[in-house]
Every structure is written in structure tokens, then in C-alpha cells.
Image: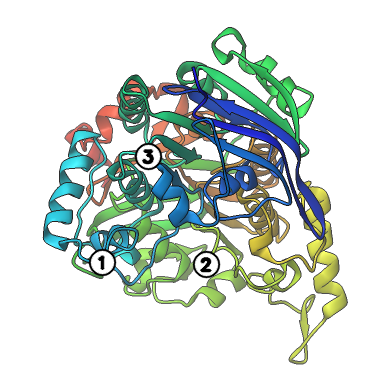
Amino acid sequence: MTARLELINISKRYPSVVANDGIHLTVEPGQIHAVLGENGAGKSTLMKIIYGAVQPDGGQVVWNGREVDIANPSAARALGIAMVFQHFSLFDTLTVTENIALGLPADTDLKQLALRIEETACAYGLELEPQRHVHTLSVGECQRVEIVRALLARPQLLILDEPTSVLTPAAVDKLFDTLRLLAAQGCSILYISHKLDEIRALCHTCTVVRAGKNAGVCDPSQETSASLSRMMIGAEPPAVTRQARTPGAAMLSVNQLDLPKSHPFATELRDVSFALRAGEIVGIAGVSGNGQQELLAALSGEDMRAAPASIQLGEVAAGRLPPGRRRALGFGFVPEERLGRGAVPDMSLADNVVLSLQTPATIRHGFLRRHAIVQRAADIIARFQVKAGGPQALARSLSGGNLQKYIVGREVMRQPTVLVVAQPTWGVDVGAAAQIRAELLALRDAGCAILVVSEELDELFEISDRLHVMAKGKLSPSLDVKEASVTLLGEWMSGLWPQAQEAAHA
């Protein structure tokens, strides 16, 4: 059988790093092929070469038995290659339909396309509203747009870069059913994920990449998560341990928070109440698009429409305070969107420090203290093992996982009294995820009050002391993590929590 895709001795060098160093990869028709490696190993660069978004410095690309030069993504799509990027390539001011139309012929009928989008999204369990503008979507909803756009092309090769990072377990199961059906129909799938259990359950073959080189090929169904981890990073990730603590005073209180929709597609927040105490981690689970984005905007100060007393930082009514005032009160924030909200792509890592650390340590008498800022960036890079070309490296030059480590590190090293984190380990490898979770637990043990909003249930069970579920703009009662289960949280994600408990909570 002729291979669908064969990469021979592919190399790509950048000024500060060798991303790919003589990579070989073979994908057969109908095969689901995982590419596994730690953050910065060169996986995403390799996928972009296949998709024509990056040109290799050397090597051959063979497509269906014929050597090809994939000059750009249009050429890749013409061959039958589709890709879902980890960092989305969507225009905020356009609708879902308009974004998808950009890759299609100019005479595409938008009304017909909207119907196709709805049909495809419904068939694969990826709920979408074609007329919504992208800036109104959560990260999880943006992920759905990218997946549906790729599926509409009916590709011969589908490349998925961390496709489940912000999907719920039910949505992941539905996506896996879709991918298995596509493979059975002859479509080849290249699958990048740091979730080892997913790779073992879904993929037929796994190529491991370490430091830009081939480190091995295996059948993941015959491996354990521990053995895959050893192939990927040379060791098993350290175990994360959580000790029981007695929490202190309430550091963040949300009291009967009601917020009308800020745009037609937003989720209205209704009677959201909870308390976050010193020395505890509270997790919020839920399907993307149920009000998490709106709650995060209200807590961070991006949306200042809340009643002043509905959000309390310590003893201070903070509902109408701007973000800078909240930070001065000890508030820290890691948004779910890395590029654009968490970091400015075309600014250096050092300059990105100033976004959240505007104190006499970095600014004095109105002047930036460049040496102190660069040193802080260097300290974050060292402590969180960020693979970067140094403090002056541009944020956009980092892999997704390394940028995530940097942004989390930037907030953790501020030593906030309250930290709100959205999707803390989105797109990071197992070793980095363990490190981030350990850092959050250490910060909690030092007395910080931490709120984690995540669609990664395993993560929430691992680090949380208490859990809530968000559904349809409302927040469930608090549940001790020892009393929670995936089944129970799944029921609550539909809004089916006990009304008596809810009334008592209110």
C-alpha cells in the first residue's frame, strides 16, 4: 500500500533553536497517527511544514507516492490536507460562517455554507451558531469552529493539534467517534496531544519526537502512560500530592452576581454566589459557553458592569474597579486565551512582564527599570523551565505550552493573595502540567486563594478542595472534591443539581 504521507529527513532551523533535525514520519491511509513530544520538541513546526505554513530547510515530503513542494496552506488544501491549529486562525470581527468562507472559493453562497456548518456541527456533536461573531466565543467554542472548518473540506489527511484541550469528556468521546469514522472511510489523521490516555485509546501508531529528533515509534495501545512518558521526556512526571488544609478568611466573595448579556450571543449570569478562602483551591467545571467567559471577565475587571458589592476582594467592594486597581489589591489572573489576552505576541517576554507587574520593582518615577524587568523574565524562564531564546524572545516565538508556562509563572511569582486561572494546563505536556499544578498547590499552601476554571476534569479532581459546576449562566452549590464524581458533575453540567441545595446555598 502506498503511504498517504512520508516525511524524509525534514529539518528546520531558527536563529535560537533547531526545531526539526532530520525527522522521518510515515502515515498510512486510514491511520490515526499520534505525534508525541514535550513542549518545544518541534511537533507543531513539523505539522506546519506539512500544511505549507512553514517551509523546511531540508528533506522531502512525499504525498500519495509523489514528492511535492507544499508552498502554502492553499496548496496543502488543494492536495486534501486540513489542519486544526492549537492557536486559532480566526478573525474576531467576522462571523463563524465568514471565517470558514475565507478558505473557500469566492463565489461560495454564505447561506448555503451556514446550513452546511450547522449540519456538520450537529452530526459531530459540536454545537455552533454560524452567525455569531468570533469575538463572542469562548476558547472551547473557537476550537469547535476550527474542527468543523476542517471537517467541511472532507480531507484525505486531517492534522489535529491539541484538539481536545478545551473539550468536555462527552465532547471528546463524540470527537473520537467522528475520527474513527473518518479513518474507516480512508482519511488519515495526524493527532498531537499531551493526553497520554487519549493517544492510547484512539491512535494506531505513535511517533515520539524529542528535542527535534525521532525518539521512537510504537503502538500506543501496547504502552502504558508511564512508558509513553518515559519515551517523551526521559522520565515519569512527578506525582502531585495535595495535603488537606484548613482554609482561612474569605479573600474573594461573589454575592448574587447578575449580569445581563453584553452582546446577543453572550450568556446571562444569574444569581452567581460563592466564596473563595485563603489556602484553598476551588474549581469550576462546565461545558464551554455556559457563562465561564462572562464570569472571568467580571472577576478580572474586563467587564465592570457588576454591582460594586457583588464582588468583594477582602473587605473592598470591587465590582466596578478596573483591572489595575484589582491587581493592587493582590489579585492575579491567567486568562484562557494565551496570545492576545495573556501575552502580546509581538512583545518580548520581558516586556510582557510589565503587563501584570506594575510596581516600584519594575516602574519607578514613571520610568521602566529595564534591568529589573529583564531579570524577572529570566527568573520566570528558569523556575518554570520555559524553552525560549531568553527574556528578549518574542512571545509568539514560543510553543503554546511554553508560553502557557511563562504566563502562569508570571502570575505565580507575583505572589498574589487571590489568583484566578482559566485552563491552567491547556496544551502543555505531562511534565509541565505536573509542575504547574504543583506550583498552584504550593501557592495555595502559602495562603493564596485560588479559583481554577477548567474543562479538564482530571485536573480539577487532582488539585481542587471544592468544586462548582457552571451551567446556563448559573453556578451549582459547592461540593467537596471527595464527594464528587465524573458522573455527578456530568449531570450537573446540564443544570440538574438539587434545587433544595441550590436554595440553601443562595
Residue found at the very far top of the displayed protein: 222
Specify the amino acid type for callout 3.
His
320 to 141, vertically: above or below = below
* Spatial CA span between label 3 and label 1: 46 Å
Res 106 label: 1
* Spatial CA span between label 2 and label 3: 28 Å
* Spatial CA span between label 1 and label 2: 29 Å
**Which residue does the image show at 37% across and 30% down from the upper left?**
172
**Which residue does the image show at 32% across and 49% down from the upper left?**
149
Residue found at the very far bottom of the displayed protein: 365
Q: Is residue 41 left or right of residue 498?
A: right
**Who comes first in sequence, dot 2 or dot 3?**
2
Q: Is residue 100 left or right of residue 23?
A: left
* Label 3 element class: strand
**Which residue does the image show at 23% across and 33% down from the upper left?**
497
* Residue 15 image position (x, y, % from top left): 81, 60
**Closer-to-camera residue (341/421):** 341
Q: Between tags 3 and 1, which lies in front?
A: 1
**Which residue does the image show at 51% across and 54% down from the upper left?**
87
Specify the amino acid type for callout 1.
Ala
Q: Is residue 390 left or right of residue 94?
A: right
Q: Are marks 3 and 1 in contact (CB under 8 Å)?
A: no
Q: Which residue is mark 3?
A: 468
Q: Which residue is mark 2?
A: 340
**Closer-to-camera residue (16/9):** 9
Decide: few, some or many residues near mark 2? Use Cα within 10 Å; few <14, some 14-19, many ≥20. few
* Residue 238 image position (x, y, % from top left): 73, 26
Res 160 label: none
* Label 2 element class: loop
**Closer-to-camera residue (51/196):** 51
Q: Is residue 47 left or right of residue 285?
A: right
